[in-house]
Amino acid sequence: ETGVTQTPRHLVMGMTNKKSLKCEQHLGHNAMYWYKQSAKKPLELMFVYSLEERVENNSVPSRFSPECPNSSHLFLHLHTLQPEDSALYLCASSQDSSPGQLNQPQHFGDGTRLSIL
Amino acid sequence: AQSVTQLGSHVSVSEGALVLLRCNYSSSVPPYLFWYVQYPNQGLQLLLKYTSAATLVKGINGFEAEFKKSETSFHLTKPSAHMSDAAEYFCAVRGFSGGYNKLIFGAGTRLAVHP
């Protein structure tokens, strides 16, 4: 496979469930990102991992827990979510861990559509 | 700090007409700018990027964008719209803070193409 792959594509869960979203990139990149995309709201950056270290957490509630075990894999662990957490969750990767690589784009997966009952 | 503003959350054109999607940026340093497209039920796909090599940038699917420093703009155009161009388009500027790069996205413009 090439590019950025996200699984599952669709997920329906109750508020008391625990689930995980998975992202895998096959591009040899050194940075990975989680975004939340809700209807009628701008794209929200949630977490950034650069060289496998978390470098940004944009005031995301603790019911979202990221994990980056290596440079190719990124997880988003979910527990006790709220209805307002229903959204499309996008993963992205890029080769840019220094100012000299500002011209490198981010490559996105197709997302996981999450619905909270 | 960097930011982008996309003028018009919805744009509607006829098939074969000119497509113009507007993006204005704010940046304290020379900007790196990107346009992405998102089709229904898909992620964001890179259309083109500006990296200071040329002010007119050609992208995929017949799209191009012109960087105008005096107007702080990076508008996206296509001479003739096709039905398959119906999608949401995002302008983004690259920022660097805290030791890592990040993209700052605009709110998006939804393009509708009617016969």
Image: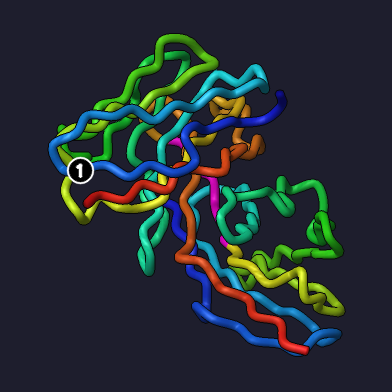
Which type of secondary structure does the marked residue at label 1 adopt? loop
Which residue sits at x=34%, y=25%?
Answer: A55
Q: Per the image, is B94 magenta?
A: yes
Decide whether residue B113 is among the magenta residues. no
Point 71% across, 45% down: residue: B51
Q: Quadrant of residue B90?
A: bottom right
Residue interval drawn in magenta = B90-96
Q: Amino acid at mark 1?
A: Gly
Q: Residue at x 22, y 39 (%)?
A: A60
Residue A52, position in %: x, y?
43, 14
Report the front residue among B78 and A40. A40
**Looking at the picture, how far across and down is residue B49, in whole percent?**
71, 50
Q: Is residue B64 left or right of residue A70?
A: right
Q: Residue furthest top?
A: A70
Q: Nearer the viewer, residue B52 or A117?
A: A117
* Whole-percent x, y for residue B99 in the image: 41, 25
Q: Which residue matches tag 1? A: A14
